[in-house]
Image (tube, rainbow, N blue to C red):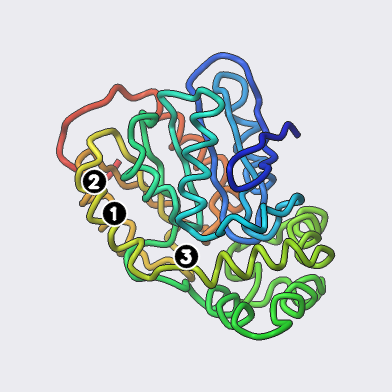
């Protein structure tokens, strides 16, 4: 994968290149760009798809130790990534984490559209049993290393405190191994993960939600009906507060819709990206 040197450190990213609308895909904690592999493969024929691996624990190159690492840092990192690559009229898509909401509020100039997929919102932090486990691990000496070892045990991967809470269907072991390897093997990555999570401001997403009321560009909220971590009502609330918000609910999926229902997710993305901007009232697509 290509890499780019940014203020906080080096980001690796996938870039399909080619013509077509630019789509930037953002993942959640303890995932990397491979969480989008099924979506990227289906969009690449007629979209330029970029998927950076953010410093969420599955990154291979640690961030600069002298630069603070927090959700606010990541928001600026995403904005700098878009700026340095000269990406404009971007459809910014995020699953699981909620940083894209703050990007849309603070840096709307590069975005043509916003897509939020079953993500942290409002006061839902840490979300679900996995989120609470991560928060506890980061507060406990040696907790992150222990968590990574436990999640690395294949018989335990479907437990509701691990990957089992995120997907209805098993994620291939080689993909999960890739997600967990940096946390298991690199103390500097574990340090990044810990300092990111300890720097979370609980009010960040509440502030972002208020800011989204002024985001005047097309926005799509995609929510998994069977999500165990992100309350279903949060999807509707996000769609209603966005001036051009639309809601699509996807059945038979948990948080990682890109894993459980990639075909339906891509269909929703294609329809949304192809639609001309409108100024209609928020509703359900």
How far is mark 3 from mark 1, CA to CA?
16 Å
- Badge nearest the viewer, 3 or 2: 2
Question: Is residue 39 placed above or below 67 in the rendered structure?
Answer: above
Residue 238's mark?
1
In-front residue for pair 195/134: 195
How far is mark 1 from mark 2, CA to CA?
6 Å
Residue ID at (67%, 77%): 159
Residue 242's mark?
2
Residue ID at (60%, 63%): 168
Residue ID at (66%, 25%): 16
Picture quarter containing residue 118? bottom left
Outermost front residue: 66
Picture quarter containing residue 174? bottom right
- Circle 2 packing at 10 Å, graded few (<14), some (14-19), many (20+), is many
- Badge nearest the viewer, 3 or 1: 1
Query: Which quadrant, please, contains the C terminus?
Result: top left
Query: Which quadrant, please, contains the N terminus?
Result: top right
- Circle 3 packing at 10 Å, graded few (<14), some (14-19), many (20+), is many
How far is mark 3 from mark 2, CA to CA?
21 Å
């Amino acid at each position: 994968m290509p890499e780019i040197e940014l203020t906080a450190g080096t980001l690796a990213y996938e870039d399909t290149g080619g013509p077509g609308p630019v789509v930037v895909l953002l993942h959640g904690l303890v995932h990397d760009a491979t969480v989008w592999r099924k979506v990227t493969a289906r969009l690449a024929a007629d979209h330029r798809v970029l998927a950076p691996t953010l410093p969420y624990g599955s990154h291979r190159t640690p961030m600069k130790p002298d630069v603070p690492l927090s959700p606010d840092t990541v928001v600026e990192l995403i904005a700098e990534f878009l700026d340095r690559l000269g990406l404009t009229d971007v459809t910014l898509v995020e699953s699981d984490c909620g940083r894209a909401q703050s990007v849309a509020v603070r840096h709307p100039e590069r975005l043509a559209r916003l897509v939020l997929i079953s993500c942290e919102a409002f006061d839902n932090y840490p979300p679900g049993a996995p989120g609470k486990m991560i928060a506890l691990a980061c507060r406990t000496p040696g907790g992150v290393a222990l968590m990574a070892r436990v999640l690395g045990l294949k018989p335990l991967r479907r437990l509701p405190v691990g990957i089992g809470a995120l997907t209805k269907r098993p994620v291939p072991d080689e993909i999960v191994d890739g997600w967990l390897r940096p946390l298991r093997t690199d103390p500097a990555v574990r340090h990044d993960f810990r300092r990111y999570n300890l720097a979370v401001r609980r009010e960040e997403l509440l502030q972002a939600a208020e800011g989204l009321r002024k985001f005047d560009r097309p926005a799509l909220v995609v929510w998994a009906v069977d999500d165990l971590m992100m309350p279903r009502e949060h999807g509707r609330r996000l769609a209603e507060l966005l001036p051009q918000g639309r809601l699509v609910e996807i059945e038979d999926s948990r948080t990682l819709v890109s894993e459980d229902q990639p075909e339906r997710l891509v269909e929703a993305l294609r329809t949304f990206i192809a639609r001309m901007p409108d100024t209609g009232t928020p509703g359900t697509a």
